[in-house]
Amino acid sequence: MKSGFVGIVGRPNVGKSTLLNSIIGEKVAITTSKPQTTRNTIRGIYNDKDLQMVFIDTPGIHKPKNALGSQMTQSALRTFKEVDLILLMVDGHPSEGPGDPFILNMLKDVKTPKFLVINKIDLIPPDAYEQIYLEYESTGIFKEIIGISAKSGKNVDVLLNKAVSYMGEGPQYFPSDMVYDYDETFMVTEIIREKALMYLEEEIPHGIFVELEIYEEKGDLLHIGAVIYCEKKSHKGIIIGKGGRKLKGIGKDARLELEGLLGIRIFLELFVKVKENWRSEDITVKKMGFSDS
Ligand SMILES: Nc1nc2c(ncn2[C@@H]2O[C@H](COP(=O)(O)OP(=O)(O)OP(=O)(O)O)[C@@H](O)[C@H]2O)c(=O)[nH]1
Ligand SMILES: [Mg+2]
């Protein structure tokens, strides 16, 4: 049996979680068009005959502005050391500020084999692709450089096949029918957060987190009560929206997806509460499990 761990790292919004979902073939991690969507390291398990690969999706590495950002970046960096193969993902956007040079510098000292994955090739003009390719090739630290589209699935199979050859003989870490390693309630809070992110703009998305207060199955109905926490009173009004319309939209979208996912009718109640400055409080951030598990 071959097995091993593969870490997916890179700046926010390059498509790491989209790649994880594409490899696993189902939604294991939420994805949005907003940077810093993923806050926890998320393990997706790829099972095939005599093969198990555990892909670790990580929060986008960025210059932290608060305790949450710092925990997120730290957990991504820790992943370097825990895996058999590292996929550094970039997209066509040139890094604003020292993002990628910072990551490259760290990677240079890590002995683990590394691939560069250039994502969103559907959006990158050929000459720009070549420039990115040559720039990263010149660092000499990548075993492979592969262009993919995580969204359409293009070349994801090529990437997977190349990654398999870096897996050694090893144990089966998880049962062969398992595709993620977290609790069902984690995905419930994540899907509610995903829908909220989609409805919200500017700073507000980064300042929210979701906590479950009720999770009770009654006959053929699952009762879920969840709180969307935000940082400011003024944000609370925006999340609720005129006549409660935005919150209703978030609730409906989340309920429909959760019903499909869990295969049960759901009564979803959403509440909005304020917890000022939670992202700057180390203790709150740790308690909420945003640090690595
Ligand atoms: N056009 C295009 N868009 C893509 C592709 N892959 C991902 N995206 C989009 O890029 C955005 C970010 O995707 P995510 O998978 O959430 O990115 P991420 O790297 O996990 O982001 P963080 O969790 O914030 O670090 C989403 O809107 C995706 O739909 C691709 O191959 N082509
Ligand atoms: Mg992500």
Image: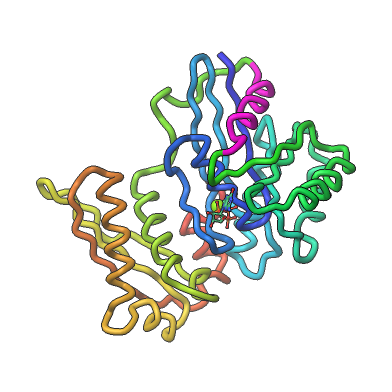
Report x, y in % for residue 115: 73, 36
Q: Is residue 243 above or below residue 174?
A: below
Residue in view at x 55 percent, y 39 percent = 153
Q: Is residue 60 above or below residue 88?
A: below
Report x, y in % for residue 254: 32, 58
Nearer to us in this view, 78 or 271: 271
Nearer to us in this view, 207 or 201: 201
How many numbered badges does the structure rendering display? Answer: 0
Relative horizontal placement of residue 221, taking residue 116 as reference (left or right): left
Report x, y in % for residue 161: 63, 25
User: Which segment did they paint magenta?
Assistant: 154-168
Q: Is residue 167 magenta?
A: yes
Quadrant in the rendering for residue 184: top left
Nearer to us in this view, 203 or 96: 96
Residue in view at x 38 percent, y 49 percent = 187
Looking at the image, the residue that sits furthest to the front is 126
Residue in view at x 25 percent, y 49 percent = 259
Q: How is the image coloured?
A: rainbow
